[in-house]
Every structure is written in structure tokens, then in C-alpha cells.
Amino acid sequence: MATGPATGGLASATVTGAGHGRLVWILGSLSAFAPLSIDMYLPALPSMARGLGTSASVAQLSLTACLAGLAVGQLLAGPLSDALGRRRPLLAGVATYAVASALCVAAPDIWALLAMRLLQGLAGAAGIVIARAMVRDLYEGNELARFFALLLMVNGTAPIAAPIIGAQLLRFTSWRGVFAVLAGIGVVLLVVTAGWLPETLPAARRHRGGGRALLRDGGRLIADRQFIGYALASGLAFGAMFAYISGSPFVLQAMFGISPQLFSLIFAINGAGIICAGLLSRRLVGRRSPRELLTVGLTGSATGGILLLAAAVLAIGLPLILPALFVMVASVGFILPNATALALSRYGGQAGSASAVIGLAQFAIGAAAAPLVGIAGPHTDLPMAVVISVLGISARLSRPRTRSPLGGESPDTAGGLSS
């Protein structure tokens, strides 16, 4: 059910009808900073490496730099939003994102680009972590899982549209033009957020106390095995997806000779799988618990990884690689909304900090996985297959064995933070 004054969020009347739809689209767009920042320039990654005179593995560090920024930035923006409210840190992050994207356009070499990509990630993290926290401010129970699934359906359009836009931009401009478009998107989101997104964390529910309080709350989150189990499961599955994001441009284009335009189409089909899985997950919540739906997603991710490894070892090629990638990527539509809802279910009072830990797990693992897929060069798919399969299997094994408060089960608040 949507929360009202009982949880200190906005009154339910403010998130119904047109206001609800606007909230979905704005929060969905803000939480899409990661796919926008990464997927749009994926088709240009090989040409960017050539243009800057660097290797494939060094060029992939531009992914790692952005992912590292997205991870660390959430640790800063999440707790800050618990103390200052959601709007001010969010607006500052979106504005900085637009500036960093513009600076990427003028990067003279790969090292300057890496620095700007790090800043871009740090700033974009505010949109991702604060969007999750705002959802937790407003919803609880099964409705929390439903809204996260709805949010995933909205920001899931970014992995579909971004590489297609990037590939088409390459017909008229270089990789620098892609970052110019990202700067423009940042400006638009800044205007929309400033004009239409309300504050969801009243002053009475904000948490003061400085760094000592943040360390205390962070320690309690880390000590909660159930919370960390869900955060780690989603993080490992997220890392498998980013291994695919980092490795697929080189494997599919350099190894199998696929054009940037066809690559963007394949990427879009896989992105559509995320949306369809998210829609199905949203409809099933209530009939099946979020924990059961999470298990379905984690099993699918592990299965896709195993099939991909088999394709690489047996040299089967695209007839098995493409279906395996689709299964692995589409599984994210079940994993992310349900793992996030399960992890945040007991932490309404510290949604920013809890959301930051979840984001750290996702993007830190993604940042570590991204460069590993290119260590053997662009003409082999084995490293990508190994990394994806190991992460997928590990995610399935990391799911907590104990039950959660969602899905009609009894709440266990012993490990939670006080609101």
C-alpha cells in the first residue's frame, strides 16, 4: 500500500493520478543515469579507442571510471540526503553531471577523459540513490516492490534507446558528440527536477549527527546479514550485466564482425527483455512473494552465464551466445526491483544510507568486472563468459536463506535501524 503520514512521506493524494505518473517518469529518468552514461557511447567504444590511440582494455577503463564514480557517489549522496532532504543534493548532482558531460567532449586524451568520467559518475550517482530513497519515503510492503518494478520499466527504456541513439549519432559525429548529447540530457533533467519533483523527506525525519552517525548506521547495515545478502545478490547480478556491457561491443563487433547499428539493435532487444521481465514481476507481486520472484531472476542469471560459458568453450558462436545473453540480461527485471525492495523494507528511516550500500555493491562489482572481460584482447569471448558465469552463479548462492518481511511473511525488525 502507498504510505501516507504514517511513514512521514507525502500524503497519498500527491502521488495519485497525474502526479503519480509524473513521479514515475521523473524518478525513472533520474535512476537511468547509469545506462545513459554507459550504453549511449558503447557503439563508439572501439572507435574512441582508435581515436585516442589507446588499447581496448584501457578504453574500457572509461567504463570502470564511471562505474567507480557511481559507486562512491552513492555513498556520499545517500547519507547526505538523509540529513539535508532529497532535493538539494539531487539538484547539485544533476547540475554537476551536465557540466562533467560537457567536459568529456573536450577531453584531449584518454586520461583526461577518465577523470571526467569519474566526475560524471560521482554526480550521476545522486540521481540513482536519491530516486530509490524517495520511493522508500513514499511506499512500503508489496507496493514498494511494485513501484520499483514500474521504475525499472521506465528506466529500462534507456538501455534500448541509448545505444540506438549512440549508433545513429556516429553517422554524423564522433564519440565526442555522444557526450554533448549527454550534457543536454543533464540540463533537461535539471530543469524538470527543479520544477516538478517535490521534497519527500520532511525535516522532522531527517537525521543529523555528522560522520559519527553515518558510520554507526553504516555499521548496522553491514552487520545485518539479510540486508547484505540481498544487496550482494543484486550487486553480483548487476556486475554480470556490466561485464556484458563492457565486453559485448568488442566480442560482437570485433570478433563476429557485427556492425555498430546491428549491435545497437541486439542491445535494444536485450534491454526490452528487462522491461518485459519487470512488467511480469510487477504483475506477479502479491501472487508470489518478492523473495520467490528474486529467486526466479537469480536462477535465470546463473543459467544464462552457464550457457554463455558453454558457447565459448565449445566454440558454438552466436546461435547460443545471443540467447544466453538475453536470458542473463532479462533476468535483471526480476532481480533489481525485488532485491531492492527486500533490502530496503526495514530501513524506511535511513533509506538514503541503505540505498547507498545497495548501489555501492552494484557499481563497485560492476567496476571491477568491466576491465576483466578485455584482458585477452577483443577477439575472444572466453573472458566475458567466465566473468558473467562466475558472477551469476555467485549471485544465486548469495541470496539470504532467511525470510523477509515482504510477501505476507512476519517482519523481523531485530536487525533494522530505528526510524
Image (cartoon, grey):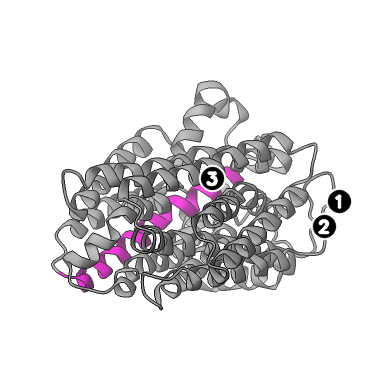
Disc 1 marks which residue? 410
Q: Which residue lies furthest to the top in this view?
A: 17
* Left or right position of 319 against 44: right
The residue carrying pointer 1 sits among few (fewer than 14), some (14 to 19) or many (20 or more) residues within 10 Å by Cα, namely: few
- Comparing marks 3 and 2, which lies closer to the viewer? 2
Q: Residue furthest bottom?
A: 376
Residue 121 on the magenta segment:
yes
Q: Position of residue 205 (x, y in %)?
A: 58, 50
| Residue at screen point 50% across, 72% down | 382
The image quadrant that residue 46 belongs to is bottom left
Numbered disc 1: secondary structure: loop
The residue carrying pointer 2 sits among few (fewer than 14), some (14 to 19) or many (20 or more) residues within 10 Å by Cα, namely: some
The residue carrying pointer 3 sits among few (fewer than 14), some (14 to 19) or many (20 or more) residues within 10 Å by Cα, namely: many
Disc 3 marks which residue? 134
- Comparing marks 2 and 1, which lies closer to the viewer? 2
Q: Is the magenta stretch mostly helix, strand or loop?
A: helix
Residue 346 on the magenta segment:
no
Say which amino acid is labelled 1.
Answer: Ser
Q: Give the range drawn in magenta.
A: 109-136
